[in-house]
Image (cartoon, grey):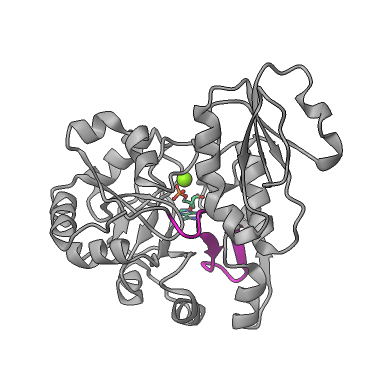
């Protein structure tokens, strides 16, 4: 896929200045971009996604200097984390400054910021010259997009009405959403697992980092909704199965789609969508596999629970259990 030309990026930046939306590739998933300092533009992001107003947005920035303007308190840890992991799949939650509209933060006192590691995202942010909200470019609760085709399939009307422009940067490299780390309080906690692990962060900072500390979140807003039990879900009913349940798990179904490793032999009329055995490659292909399985028109999607250990597998299993609403 050819990268968007600089002229297209300039057009996209102009679209943002007019308060309209631009879907853009990042290393994690495609984002739905809008001017983060324009409350009306932000409202149209919620409207297009059908996103509940109590689910805050991540603000994307080209650099740490822009991030600093969005927060009232920039902890020392933020400097070290940004130096080490930005641009990259780490979102930092800090106390917001006055310039950030409350719609961005769902009425809360903290704001989530990250600098994406993708030339198109960074080119767009620089051309636009300011911060941009960028939730995943899918209807709320649905499977995140990792290709421009996924985005186009999700929002055909908005694209036809020229309210949404899509920048095509090919398939996303990492494939699952960023790690969300709350550093707004005395204790630091991972609100959403991602490619950057609690151990890596803890080692860098020389301190303890909790995982899944959503009960610590104040502000009356909902905890990090990446923590909702049903999220990232295909429309077709999906469930996880373990190796020992095979092939009994197929009983009673007319036609299912099995998402499993490349060596699984799936008897017809059932379909097989294969994912690699290695964690990073599995994560990179996961959402495309869910989109493909959803489009295949089976009665169900059966996903073999991967057994691997390590933080990337933990992040993958987190998304799988949510996709299945478990
Ligand atoms: P997405 O819609 O895929 O971009 O997901 C954004 C994630 O960041 C969700 O899990 C949000 O709940 C989380 N998030 C955004 N802002 C905040 C915040 N201020 N505090 C905690 N979590 C946040
Ligand atoms: Mg999302």
94 versus 317 height, above or below = below
Q: Residue at x 35, y 70 (%)?
A: 67
Q: Residue at x 43, y 57 (%)?
A: 109
Residue 31 place in picture, x, y as percent: 37, 50
Is residue 283 rendered magenta in the image? Answer: no
Q: Nearer the viewer, residue 209 or 126?
A: 126
Q: Residue at x 65, y 49 (%)?
A: 318
Is residue 189 rendered magenta in the image? Answer: yes
Q: Nearer the viewer, residue 286 or 310?
A: 286
Q: Which residues are magenta?
A: 172-191
Residue 195 place in picture, x, y as percent: 57, 63
**Left-right relation of 90 to 245:** left
32 versus 66 height, above or below = above
**Left-right relation of 212 to 287:** right
Using the rendered view, name the quadrant where residue 321 is placed. Answer: top right
Q: Nearer the viewer, residue 208 or 143?
A: 143
Q: Nearer the viewer, residue 278 or 215?
A: 278
212 versus 145 height, above or below = below
**Number of dots carrying numbers:** 0
Q: Residue at x 53, y 54 (%)?
A: 284
Residue 234: tell me if it is visible: no
Residue 73 place in picture, x, y as percent: 42, 73
Instruction: Identify the main secondary structure in magenta.
Output: loop
**Left-right relation of 101 to 287:** left
């Amino acid at each position: 896929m050819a990268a968007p030309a600089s002229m297209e990026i300039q057009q996209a930046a102009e679209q943002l200045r007019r308060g309209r939306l631009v879907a853009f590739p990042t290393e994690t998933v495609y984002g739905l971009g809008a001017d983060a300092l324009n409350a009306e533009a932000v409202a149209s992001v919620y409207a297009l996604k059908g996103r509940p107003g109590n689910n805050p947005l991540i603000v994307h920035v080209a650099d740490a200097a822009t991030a600093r303007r969005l927060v009232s308190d920039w902890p020392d840890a933020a400097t070290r984390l940004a130096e080490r992991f930005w641009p990259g799949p780490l979102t930092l939650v800090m106390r917001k400054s006055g310039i950030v509209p409350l719609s961005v933060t769902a009425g809360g006192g903290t704001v989530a910021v990250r600098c994406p590691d993708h030339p198109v995202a960074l080119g767009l942010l620089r051309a636009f010259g300011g911060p941009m909200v960028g939730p995943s470019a899918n209807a709320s609760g649905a499977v995140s997009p990792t290709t421009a085709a996924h985005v186009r399939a999700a929002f055909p009307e908005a694209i036809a009405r020229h309210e949404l422009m899509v920048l095509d940067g090919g398939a996303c490299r990492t494939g699952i959403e960023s790690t969300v780390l709350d550093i707004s309080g005395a204790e630091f906690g991972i609100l959403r697992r991602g490619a950057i692990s609690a151990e890596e962060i803890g080692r860098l900072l020389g301190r303890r980092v909790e995982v899944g500390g959503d009960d610590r979140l104040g502000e009356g807003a909902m905890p990090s909704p990446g923590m909702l039990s049903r999220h990232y879900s295909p429309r077709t009913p999906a469930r996880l199965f373990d190796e020992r349940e095979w092939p009994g798990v197929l009983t009673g179904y007319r036609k299912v789609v099995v998402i499993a490793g490349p060596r699984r032999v799936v008897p017809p009329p059932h379909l097989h969508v294969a994912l690699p055995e290695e964690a990073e490659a599995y994560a990179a292909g996961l959402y495309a596999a869910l989109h493909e399985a959803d489009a295949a028109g089976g009665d169900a999607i059966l996903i073999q629970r991967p057994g691997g250990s390590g933080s990337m597998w933990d992040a993958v299993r987190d998304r799988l259990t949510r996709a299945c609403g478990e």
